[in-house]
Each structure stands twice: as C-alpha cells, then as structure tokens.
Amino acid sequence: MHFFDYKGSKLYAEGVSVEKIAEATGTPVFIYSAKTLARHFKAFDGAFKGAKHLICYSVKANSNLSVLKTFSTLGGGFDIVSAGELHRVVKAGGDTSKVVFSGVGKREDEIAFALKQNILIFNVESPEELRAIDKVAGRLRKKAGIAIRVNPDVDPKTHPYISTGLKKNKFGIETKEALKEYIYAKDNLKNLKLLGVDCHIGSQITQISPFIDAIKKVKGLIGKLRKEGIGVEYLNMGGGLGINYDDETPPHPSEYGARIVEETKDLGLTLIFEPGRNLVGNAGILVTEVVYTKEGSAKNFVITDAGMNDLPRPSLYDSFHNVIAVNKFKGRRKFKADIVGPICETGDFIAKDRSITKVKSGELLAVMSAGAYCFSMSSNYNSRTRAAEVMVKGRDFAVVRKRESFDDLTAKESMPRKLFAGKKR
Ligand SMILES: *Cc1c(COP(=O)(O)O)cnc(C)c1O
C-alpha cells in the first residue's frame, strides 16, 4: 500500500500534486511519501508484536538522511554494509546501539569506526573477518558483539544476482564451519561477545518457505551451540521480503511475521530483521519528463530525461517498474513502446515493449516502486547530475537532496600542474 494516487486525472503524492513538485524541482526527481514509509515500518514492526524483536532498516536500499530519520524516529535500528552508511546513520541521529554491520569485506578502519560508535553486532562473513574484528577490538580495548552469518544453502527463488544464501554465493559461512568458528572464538578470541546467529538469504523473496527452510537449518546450529555452552541472544533473519512491482504476490508482513514467530518462539531469542526494499520500495516514485518520442517500423521509443544512471534496476536485473502518466489525458490511444533514457548504452532502458498511453514530449511520467535500490545505486555516468530527492508529508513537501550541479560533477577533480608542465608544443 502506498499513497501515490490519482485525484481526477492528476497523480498525487499524498496531498501534493506530482506535477507541482516537478515544476518546483525540475526532472528527473524522486518523490518519497513519509506516510508510506511510516505505514510500512509499522506494518513490519507490528507483525512481531509480542515477540522480542528489533527492526534494523537496511540502509543500502535508500540511504537518504530524511529516510533514515523517519525510521529512527519510529524506533528503528539500522543494518549497514559500510562505514559510510554508519556515518549517515550517525548524521541522521540514529541510535548506534541498534546498528548491525553486514558485508563480506569490512576493512579494519571500518571495524574500528563501528566499534567506536558502539554498534550492537557485526554480522561476520568469514573466519578471517572474525579474527580481524577480535584484533581491532583488542587494540581499542572494546568488546565486539558478533553474529556469524551462516549460509544455510537454501534457494530463495529470486533473481540470481540477489540470491545470497546458496553455497555458491560469496556470503556467510557454511553451517558446519560456523559451529567450529563459534567454538574457536569462545576459546580464543577474548575480545568478542558471541551474541547471535545471522542469516540473510536474498532479496525480493515472494514466498515464506525459503525463510522457514533457513530457520530450520539455523535452529540446528543454535541447538549445537547451546550444547557447547554458547548461548546466543539474537537470531537475525536478515531482510529480503519482496514487494509488488508487477503481478508478484509477496506475503504481507503480518503473514511473514506470524510464521516466523511460530517457528522461532521456542528459542526464546530476540529476533532481528533487516528489511530494506519492503519498507521503501513502494514509498518512492521517479518522475521524468518525456524529451522525445520516436516511432519506427520495428519499435516505438519514448525517450525520457531519466536514464539508467538514475534508475539502474532495469538494466542491472532486467526488472519491471510500472510506468504511468502524471496527467491522464482523455481520448489518448495506447501504443507499445520502449521507454528509454538518454544514455549512450543499449542497456539504458526503463521499460521494454510496454503498452502505455501515448505521450508527447514535455509530458511527465511516473516510474513506480522506485524507492529502493534506485537513487542509492544511481551514478554520474555520462556526466549526468544526479536527480533531486523530495519527501512529501501530507500537504507539505521538501527537497531532501538537491539536484547535483555541474560544479558537483567536477568538484573532486583537478589538473595538477606537474602533470602538464613542460614545453608547449
Ligand atoms: C541488502 C541486504 C538486506 C536488505 O534486503 P532487502 O531485500 O532490501 O530487504 C538485508 N540484509 C543484508 C545483509 C543485505 O545485504
């Protein structure tokens, strides 16, 4: 559920006309709905009421400070995958004692920064990382809370690029080896607190069964840990609950919550979740202006001022985004077209062979479900300035990230004299 709806023929974000926002900011512009963000957070959080739990929003899905602040105000923690993301959490006023740190390649400086910020748990993805965290913690005279990310070898039945819990994926440690590592850590790595077990199996998962399969495997490990006198407090189920882009039918968080609580209640652990897409995906749209249309004998094209640098998901994962007109014009016929960006790559498309109402240059389109893994994956490719981001709340809206300027594009670059000194030709 989201709050982007037509009032008459005009698309609104909550109580504000999308056209009005585009007039004020220019295009392309991302628009986020605060009410939708809050609704999604509360739905997810509410799905676990009665069970001890912590919702750690996965920052990489959308790392805008105002998005982070929205969740932190609602009591959320954060799942980070870099020191840069931790910097954002701190800047947004997030509670670092509710931060978990994932990722296969945490550097020692990142580990040190996280320890200084007193985060809750490092989700550890390899034996070497486990030893590195112990070493850095020792140097800082700190105790690092850790959970080993186990790779439960279950198939999440999603796009191969976003499935992470199979043996062939780079993530986590196989269950058997994980047990050995916990025992080794208990006996040898004195700067660690063995707080939990972690498993994140992938993204855009639209069934509950892969999560349940993962729990079953992890439960076996927790039983063995207890026999070894290692009593963990947290079970981190990761993120991954899918959303509706097209005709998917992902379970509602309440259904997912009920099943997970049922499967885990005998463990007596605090559950951690790391939802990203589920909280923000449908809370954002990308508004773009049609620059040209081109009708050919083989294909029609709608060329927009947003490209793969703004919205990388279609070219990266061949993913589907619904595209709708910001103003519904009466009496327009439909046609089939590729909606493409201005970038010099054939892979630069927003939608392929899409049947849409005919649009004209200067008109606005809204790309739906653009709140997750869009702006956060955007780039400056083709020296395009990154889009503005706006947040709407009721009848109010504000720019939460300015559109980049040409000066921003070149701000970090230089032409050092010593490289160009010498005889002029
Ligand atoms: C990306 C990621 C998430 C969030 O995944 P969603 O599908 O957006 O919920 C959670 N945990 C980890 C470790 C991740 O890498």
Image (cartoon, helix red, strand yellow):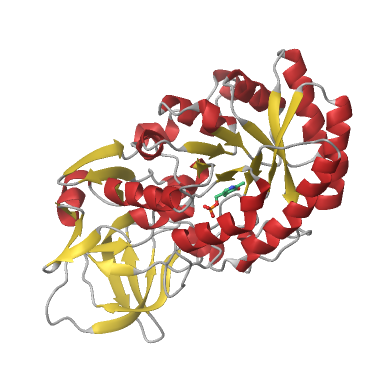
Choose between 81 and 409: the one closer to the eye: 81
For this orientation, the residue located farthest to the front is 266
If the image is split into quadrants, where does the N terminus sit? bottom left
Residue 213 is situated, as x and y percent measured from the top left of the image, at: 69, 63
Choose between 213 and 389: the one closer to the eye: 213
Residue 55 is situated, as x and y percent measured from the top left of the image, at: 50, 43
At horizontal 56% and vertical 61% (from top left) the residue drawn is 259
At horizontal 86% and vertical 47% (from top left) the residue drawn is 177
If the image is split into quadrants, where does the C terminus sit? top right
Left or right position of 420 against 48: right
Determine whether 186 is above or below 345 in the image: above
Residue 190 is situated, as x and y percent measured from the top left of the image, at: 81, 22
At horizontal 49% and vertical 36% (from top left) the residue drawn is 77
In the rendered image, is residue 78 in sight? yes
In the rendered image, is residue 158 in sight? no
Quadrant of the rendered image containing residue 163:
bottom right
Left or right position of 246 against 402: right
Choose between 171 and 351: the one closer to the eye: 171
Left or right position of 228 against 303: right
Quadrant of the rendered image containing residue 189:
top right
Residue 172 is situated, as x and y percent measured from the top left of the image, at: 74, 48
At horizontal 45% and vertical 55% (from top left) the residue drawn is 278
